[in-house]
């Protein structure tokens, strides 16, 4: 986890520039969350397909992915909640910029 406590403050900029920098950073975070959600979906689909393939091949072995899938689902849910918070923050920033 990154720790910005010791970083130097940003160079003073106008309120408009600050809003634009913050909005750009929020959009970047949202994009990274979307990428991770797609990765989680792909891994879950891959593991689901692997389970179906082994069962379809006539094998007596059945792989239960219940111990793995909930972790992906929980991670995905956390990312979705985080994205919602970032969307809200971006909306609030946008609205405050209109009043300024």
Image: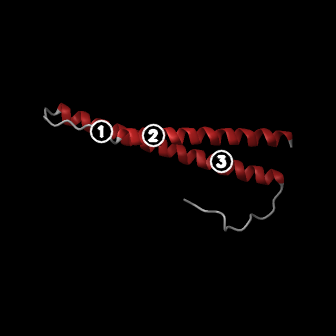
- Residue located at (75% from left, 43% from top): 93
Front position among marks 3 and 1: 1
Work out whether 100 lies above or below 10: above
Mark 1 Cα within 10 Å, few/some/many (few <14, many 20+)? few
Left/right of residue 38 with respect to residue 85 in the rendered view = left
Q: Which of marks 1 and 2 is nearer the N terminus?
A: 1
- Residue located at (68% from left, 50% from top): 24
Label 1 with label 2: CB-CB less than 8 Å = no
Left/right of residue 66 with respect to residue 21 in the rendered view = left
Q: Where is residue 67 in the image (x, y as percent from the top left)?
A: 32, 41
- Name the residue carrying label 3: 26
Asked where in the image residue 7 lies, by quadrant, the reply is bottom right
State how far apart marks 2 and 3 are (Cα).
23 Å
Number of marks drawn: 3
State how far apart marks 1 and 2 are (Cα).
14 Å
State how far apart marks 3 and 1 are (Cα).
34 Å
Q: Is mark 2 on a helix, strand or loop?
A: helix
Label 3 with label 1: CB-CB less than 8 Å = no
Q: Which of marks 3 and 1 is nearer the N terminus?
A: 3
Work out whether 73 lies above or below 5: above
Front position among marks 2 and 3: 2
* Quadrant including the N terminus: bottom right
- Name the residue carrying label 1: 65
Q: Earlier in the sequence, mark 2 or mark 3?
A: 3
Asked where in the image residue 53 lies, by quadrant, the reply is top left
- Name the residue carrying label 2: 74
- Residue located at (13% from left, 32% from top): 58
Label 2 with label 3: CB-CB less than 8 Å = no
Mark 3 Cα within 10 Å, few/some/many (few <14, many 20+)? some
Left/right of residue 24 with respect to residue 61 in the rendered view = right
């Amino acid at each position: 986890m990154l720790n910005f406590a010791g970083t130097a403050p940003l160079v003073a900029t106008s309120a408009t520039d600050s809003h634009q920098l913050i909005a750009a950073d929020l959009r970047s975070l949202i994009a990274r969350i979307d990428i991770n959600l797609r990765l989680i979906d792909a891994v879950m689909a891959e593991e689901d397909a692997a389970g179906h393939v082994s069962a379809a091949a006539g094998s007596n072995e059945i792989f239960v992915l219940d111990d793995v899938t909930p972790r992906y689902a929980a991670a995905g849910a956390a990312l979705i909640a985080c994205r919602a918070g970032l969307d809200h923050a971006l909306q609030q920033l946008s609205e405050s910029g209109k009043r300024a």
